[in-house]
Amino acid sequence: MKDLRIRLSDAAISDILEQSDWYERQEDRRLSQRWESAVSSAILRIAKNPRFGAPCEFKAEELHRPRRIPVAGFPKHLIFYQFHADELLILRIIHGARDLESLL
C-alpha cells in the first residue's frame, strides 16, 4: 500500500494538546512527552497498516465505520480514524470511558 497523507481533525489536535497539558499538570513534563510520543507512534503505525484497527459500529450513519486502536502505554485512550484512497484522517483521540458516539 502506498503512503497515506495523514490529516488530523481540529478535534484530534485539541485532544492531543489537552491531554498533554493535563498530564503535565498532574504529573510532569516527561509523562506529557511520553503521551505525545505514544500518539505519534500510533498514528505512524496506522498509516503503515490502516486496516490494523478494529472497525467501530455506531448508530450515526455519517460516521462511516471508523476504526480504532489504543495508544500504547495509555490503553484506555483510543485513536479513532478513517482512511480513504490516499488519506488517513484521525478523527479523535479520547478516553474509552467517555460517550464516544457523541464525541465523534
Image (tube, helix red, strand yellow):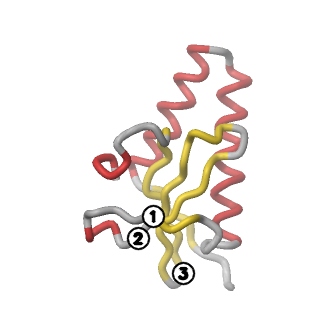
**N-term-proximal mark, 2 vs 1:** 1
Graded by Cα atoms within 10 Å as few (under 14), some (14 to 19) or many (20 or more), the crowding at tag 1 reads: few
**N-term-proximal mark, 1 vs 3:** 1
Q: For the residues labelled 3 and 2, say whether their Cβ atoms are less than 8 Å apart.
A: no
Residue 45 shown left or right of residue 54 in the figure: right
Q: For the residues labelled 1 and 3, say whether their Cβ atoms are less than 8 Å apart.
A: no
The residue at the point 34 percent across, 53 percent down is 104
Residue to which mark 1 is pinned? 56
The residue at the point 39 percent across, 50 percent down is 10
Q: Nearer the viewer, residue 100 or 88?
A: 100
Instruction: Measure the alpha-carbon separation of dots 3 and 2.
Output: 17 Å
**N-term-proximal mark, 3 vs 2:** 2
For the N terminus, give its image quadrant: bottom right
Residue 15 shown left or right of residue 54 in the figure: left
Q: For the residues labelled 2 and 1, say whether their Cβ atoms are less than 8 Å apart.
A: yes
Instruction: Measure the alpha-carbon separation of dots 2 and 1.
Output: 6 Å
Residue type, numbered disc 2:
Arg
Q: In this picture, is 104 found above or below 57?
A: above
Residue type, numbered disc 3:
Asp
Coordinates of residue 13 in the picture (x, y in percent): 47, 45
Graded by Cα atoms within 10 Å as few (under 14), some (14 to 19) or many (20 or more), the crowding at tag 2 reads: some
Coordinates of residue 90 in the picture (x, y in percent): 49, 59
Residue to which mark 2 is pinned? 65
Residue to which mark 3 is pinned? 86
Residue type, numbered disc 1:
Cys
Coordinates of residue 79 in the picture (x, y in percent): 54, 52
